[in-house]
Image (spheres, rainbow, N blue to C red):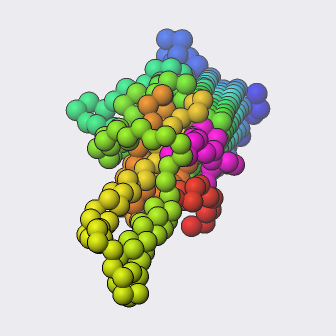
Amino acid sequence: MGGFAGRPGRGTSPTAMLRAHGRWLGGRGGRRANRGGVDLEGADLHGADLRRADLTGENLRGADLRGARLGGAVLSGADLAGADLRNAALAGADLGGARLTGARLDDANLADADLRRAVLRDADLSGAHLSGARMAGADLARANLLSTTWGDRPPAEEDGEGPVPFSMAGADLRGAVLSGYDLRAADLTDADLTGADLRRADLRGARLFRARLEGALLDGARLEDADMGEADLRAASFAARPAGAPAPATPPAAPRPARAGAALRPRLVLGAALALGCAAALAVGLPAYLGDPPENTVPASSAFATAPASPEPLRLDLSAVGGGSWVEVHAGGTREGRLLFSGFVTGDAPHTFPLGEGGLWLRAGNPEGLSADIGEGAMAFDGSTGNFVVDADGVRRVDGG
């Protein structure tokens, strides 16, 4: 441990403060840190024992707190911007409203810590232990949360209140263990959750727009009202239907009549009807034109009465292959069309949508987990996350459209 140098000008030295705090911890008099008002900006507190210290609102900018023992300490409203807290023990610490912008918290133990409304923008929390930490209202934008462990129990909610959103926009959460965690209404826009463990996590109302979830584990996660537009869900695991996954927005379609052979294309049916009409007209009009009408001529109206009924409207049966995929479906063949469905296609039962004029526009997170059928057999969606149009001609990719 260094000499605990701090900036001069306020109270006693950091070294004297720590000695007095040690005596206070041992019940031998002394004084609880930082009641003496020591200036701790940039202080060398490497390995210091500051358990249960009262550092409310203190200026600890740039302080060296590597390996420091801060369990149960009160740091609410403290300024720790740029501080080095690598391997620090902060279990149960109160960091509510603290400013930790750009701080180093690699491998720190923050279990059961209170981080509500703390500012952790651009902070490095790689490998940190956050089991039971309360994060409501915290700002973790662009924070490095690589391989963090969040435990399998949700944080305590604030009394009498619903979930308070917190931001992880752009955060690096690769490999993070967030199983069972309460992330309701969290902002994870552009976050990298590649390989993250989100099994049984509560992501209701969360914003996952453009998030990377490649290879993430989402088995049993709650995803009602989550915004997963343009999210990358390649190889994401949905082995079980997500709890509370939304049902199709369209009513169940009537069963499609059994047909022998392939479905009739609308253009072929129209061509057949026109050919029959022309044949009937020739049968009636040509003999009359030649001056020798037949005795038992069939009226034109009777000929047309035998024409086939209007072709059955084509429908898309969208089925899961393997783990399925998150899908967004719009009518009219464009993203601007009416939203028909937004949710997960999993299980054995297909989701059915009328093709209508212009077909359907789809965005699929895991295209290889889907199969399309418009009456001519299953067709595959190829490639990674992207946009597709399904119409009478089949399935085609239209990324950027």
Q: Is residue 5 left or right of residue 50?
A: right
Q: Which residue sits at x=63%, y=58%?
A: 397
Which residue is at the front of the view, 237 or 247? 247
Which residue of the protein is positioned furthest toward the top in this rendering?
A: 27
Which residue is at the front of the view, 371 or 152? 371
Q: Is residue 78 visible?
A: no
> How many numbered marks appear?
0
Which residue of the protein is positioned furthest toward the left in this rendering?
A: 160
Displayed quadrant of residue 105: top right
Quarter that holds the C terminus: bottom right
Quarter that holds the N terminus: top right
The answer to whether residue 116 is above or below residue 331 is above
Percent from the top left, x then y, of residue 283?
39, 74
Q: Report the magenta residues as a range.
A: 367-386
Q: Is residue 322 visible?
A: yes
The answer to whether residue 233 is above or below residue 45 is below
- Residue 231, magenta (yes or no): no
Percent from the top left, x then y, of residue 101?
59, 50
Q: Which residue sits at x=43%, y=50%?
A: 315
Displayed quadrant of residue 234: top right
Percent from the top left, x then y, of residue 92?
49, 23
Q: Which residue sits at x=46%, y=48%?
A: 316
Which residue is at the front of the view, 192 or 367? 367
Which residue is at the front of the view, 88 or 320? 320
Percent from the top left, x then y, of residue 2?
77, 32
Q: Which residue sits at x=49%, y=32%?
A: 346
